[in-house]
Image (cartoon, rainbow, N blue to C red):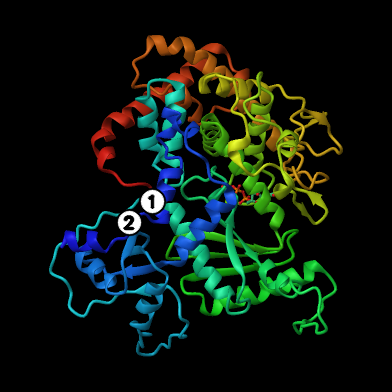
Amino acid sequence: QRPILRLLSCPGTVAEDLRRNEQPSGSVETGFEDKIPRKRFSEMQNERREQAQRTVLIRCPEKISENKFLKYLSQHGPINNHFFYESFGLYAVVEFCRKESVGSLQNGTRTPSVAMETAIPFRSRFLSLKLKNQTSEQSCIQSSNQLPPSNRKLFELLCYAESIDDQLNTLLKEFQLTEENTKLRYLTCSLIEDIAAAYFPDCVVRPFGSSVNTFGKLGCDLDMFLDLDETRNLSTHKTSGNFLMEFQVKNVPSERIATQKILSVIGECLDHFGPGCVGVQKILNARCPLVRFSHQASGFQCDLTTNNRIALTSSELLYIYGTLDSRVRALVFGIRCWARAHSLTSSIPGAWITNFSLTMMVIFFLQRRSPPILPTLDSLKTLADAEDKCIIEGNNCTFVRDLNRIKPSGNTETLELLLKEFFEYFGNFAFNKNSINIRQGREQNKPDSSPLYIQNPFETSLNISKNVSQSQLQKFVDLAQESAWVLQQKDTDRLSVSSHQPWGLAAILLPSVPNRRSLTKKKRKRSANESIKNLLESLKSNRTANFTETNEK
Ligand code: CTP
Ligand code: MG
């Protein structure tokens, strides 16, 4: 059956093009990214969105023949690519070459009627496959993994790495969003867009935040932005003529109330007939109103906002920083994992540092190197052309969008050095008087008494880490100092221990002993040795199991 399927798949598609252009994890080591023309954020978003519109999500029975499944779907048109994944059941993501195929497939499906229950007949691209006759064939579907590695697997990989640089690149490879996971994120936004389009036919639902800014870890939330600009602009296209065509609109007193009303109805919609949307919460009184829900089939925790274009722009800025130099993402992932391992960050909102703030701190640190590894936002602004000019709600969001116009850094420092220096730098930073500012790339006096002040790059009067308490900041500083110390020690330790023991990055991801710095040196050494010994024991006993193990849920 293989030849038939190959004949059906279409050549030279956007997906292949993207695969050629994207930076696979391997590029971290090879440095190939310098030779490939790099896509603009908006191009990447548009292509992915168009891909997602040709894609369907299908819940499959446990036993299924992949060949028959694809052959059946190919009746509706050639398939560009597909993959399966598990999320409390087996799912398939199938991308057709043409959008019409989706309509054709939908026309051939029916709304199931189950005794005692009635389905709301909402025409979606989330389908469920029921087989009339159970297949007797053994299902040997290869599932694509959507979860990060277990701690055990991670420690093992890190212990076997050759250098701290190698460890950071390994961590990046294991945690970064895969091609499949990225596709699933865009597909989920596209499915939500279908629902929102019931109210706003020209709306676009765009992912932002870590799903698209190159810093997303497997398992991170999916931030979505309901973009109504198309709808808004329809009424302003025509500027002359005798007739003024106006939509019948209802006026409300403020932009905020409009946002709340829009999100309120979309929230209702998702709750009442959004296939697979559960636990819908409308959080409309927040500074940035949102609807939070779980998309069960994809397993994503979603935050939907509207009127949040600045956040999309800051995702674009981070995308540029993450793509410019291969060391940036490796360092950010290392610091994010380190912070998570020590409970400096949390999935629950509170007084902790967020991943977004940590990323800003890494960017700032890399701007401060000599020569700088990353350019300041002001210098990206000077490289901008007329097309890049952008003012949002009175804030100047102009910066160069074409990555190929930014000169690569001449700095050749290793990741190992950068990691150590990051901890040294922030372990001794004058947080009491200085703020962090990536626009100018230098410290400035804090404009208020917040313990941690990181200037919002576009809404420059805002502090993105306003939520952080003094005690959480102190915890960060203590751990940074401790980790700098551990990394210094490991320079000599590494020569005396076999490579199977936690060292380098693995050593600083271990839970720390409170106030370790105040303990005597002897005691310090003993506790570290004990942790290492325990970990080694558990690695030994689980080594065989680990290689076959799937990820921790
Ligand atoms: N954002 C912002 N100002 C803040 C918080 C968030 O502008 N004070 C924007 C940023 O663009 C951020 C996005 O909102 O990337 C999403 O916020 P969040 O989900 O908290 O951060 P992520 O970067 O997505 O990181 P995570 O992986 O922790 O979700
Ligand atoms: Mg997020």
Horizontal relation, residue 231 to residue 326: left or right:
right
Which of the two residues, 20 or 144, is positioned nearer the viewer here? Answer: 20
Q: Dot 1 lies on which element?
A: helix
| Location of residue 305 with respect to 129 vertically, above or below | above
Q: Amino acid at mark 1?
A: Glu
| Location of residue 316 with respect to 127 vertically, above or below | above
Query: Dot 2: within a 10 Å radius of its alpha carbon, few (fewer than 14), some, or many (20 or more) residues?
Result: few
Horizontal relation, residue 167 to residue 541: left or right:
right
Q: Does residue 354 appear in the picture of this structure?
A: no
| Location of residue 125 with respect to 306 vertically, above or below | below
Q: Does residue 267 appear in the picture of this structure?
A: yes
Residue located beneath label 2 in the image:
11
Q: Residue at x 53, y 69 (%)?
A: 192
Q: Residue at x 42, y 40 (%)?
A: 24
Query: Dot 1: within a 10 Å radius of its alpha carbon, few (fewer than 14), some, or many (20 or more) residues?
Result: few
Residue located beneath label 1 in the image:
16
Please say if the residues under marks 2 and 1 sit with CB atoms less than 8 Å apart: yes
**In terms of image quadrants, where is residue 238?**
bottom right
Q: Residue at x 65, y 53 (%)?
A: 312
How far apart, in angstroms, are the residues tagged by discs 2 and 1?
8 Å
Q: Nearer the viewer, mark 2 or mark 1?
A: 2
Q: Earlier in the sequence, mark 2 or mark 1?
A: 2
Q: Position of residue 147 (x, y in %)?
A: 41, 49
